[in-house]
Image: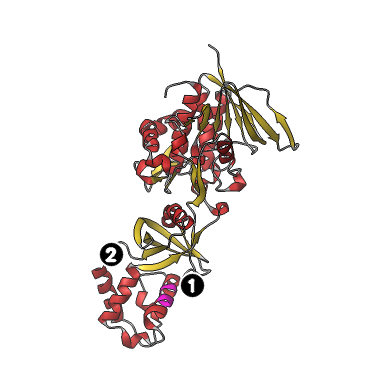
Amino acid sequence: MILKNIAVIGAGASGMMAAIAASGNSRVSLFDKNDFPGRKLLQTGNGKCNFLNESDPAPHFRGSLSDSGIVSDIFARYDRDHILKLFSSFGLLFHIKNGGYYPRSDSAASVNDILIDALKERHVAFHPRVQVKGIDKKGELFFLDLFHLNNNKRSKDETPFDAVIVATGGKAAPKTGSTGDGYYFAEKFALSVARPLPALTRLLSPDPFFNDNTVRALVSVKLFIDDSFAASSTGELQINAGGPSGICIFDLSGRAARALKEERSCYISIDFLPEFDDAFVFSLLNNRVGRIKEEDPPTALFTGIFSERLSVNICEKLENLLFKGRAFHGILNDTLIRDITNLIKNMRFEITGTGEFAVSQVTSGGITADCLNPDLSAKNVPGLFFTGECLDADGDCGGFNLHFAWASGLTAGLAAAGAVG
């Protein structure tokens, strides 16, 4: 049997998986800018690597590959059980925490190490500190233009490749090597690219509520675009200087980024007590009113309900919107308490921007579905594949994006090698 030569550009999560998948009946060369594979993978989940989720991943995605059904088809073939079986075969122990799958060690290095071992076992040739500057196709074969970062020299790789898999990531976390190279290759071959935007990142707001205090609270957040409900998420909110952050904000950031790019208005509504309905909160506050002494500060209204720092922020909001300089002790009637209840359950903030790529976890946008086959090969360039974050598909927090990295890497790797998964 004549073995194929396959080049994989980018040794992130999807690139490593693509190389592993392709190596069954091919000679695989893996190129990366870094000294070792998986640099960005080591940062995921705050270094703990939430690599899968118990939930069905497809509904948690956006982008043209999601809209076209490519994402759901890929997940149908490489579902959670398939990925777990594969990682178990590599020797990974894992556990479930809050619906997410983590290595039992709670260290991303455990996941990265078993993938590196799998690459070595399959004799994948790893080329560190090499940036692929160009892909040339001559007939049915591909040739790479390489830049060697160790000595700042360029060279033409004389190896003819039967297929090339581009797994260079998006533009998020550029310090790990994700600088949008995949979009450059796509455009050189006349493939369409939806404008890359930051996702899984903070939001920016001019509201003084977001000061320089790091306050955390369990909340529910709704995103509105042009005054219409767009999405919601529940989780930990972080109140930072310049705007909100935290997992629940990350899940909404990609949608907000696209809307702001289109010059549409955005605001979020935060429910600071999502576990309780309005009637319960009203009763709770009424009970607190009876315990407040005249010398107590306004924050006494929230004793036992919110942290002291969050109470201060909320009271500043109440002062601006409701108290307006009046001593709150004498005005806490049922009407005002109902207004406070409504504010706690529905506090609105204008959103004017998102975090930069440098502080974002993934990229929204990328190579669009209309120029790709279901196996992630380019329709107009046989043998050229794209996988992972450089595609126009981004998911929520919770291991969904890594699941797509594994599944899309398997899809492209097996297809490039002519194998069946």
Foreground of the two, 372 or 4? 372
For disc 1, the neighbor class at 10 Å (few under 14, some 14 to 19, many from 20) is some
- Location of residue 267 (image quadrant): bottom left
**Relative side of 7 to 71, left or right:** right
**Relative side of 325 to 147, left or right:** left
Q: Give the residue type that dot 2 points to.
A: Phe
Bounds of the magenta span? 313-317
> Is label 1 in contact with label 2 (beta carbons under 8 Å)?
no
Residue 274 horizontal/vertical position (percent)? 32, 62
In the image, which disc is placed on residue 276? Answer: 2
Q: Is residue 193 above or below residue 123?
A: below
For disc 2, the neighbor class at 10 Å (few under 14, some 14 to 19, many from 20) is few
Circle 1 SS class: loop
Q: Is residue 67 above or below residue 29?
A: below
* Real-space Cα separation, disc 1 to disc 2, in angstroms: 26 Å
Which residue is identified by label 1?
Answer: 208
Q: Give the residue type that dot 1 points to.
A: Pro
Tell me if I can see residue 145 in this picture: yes
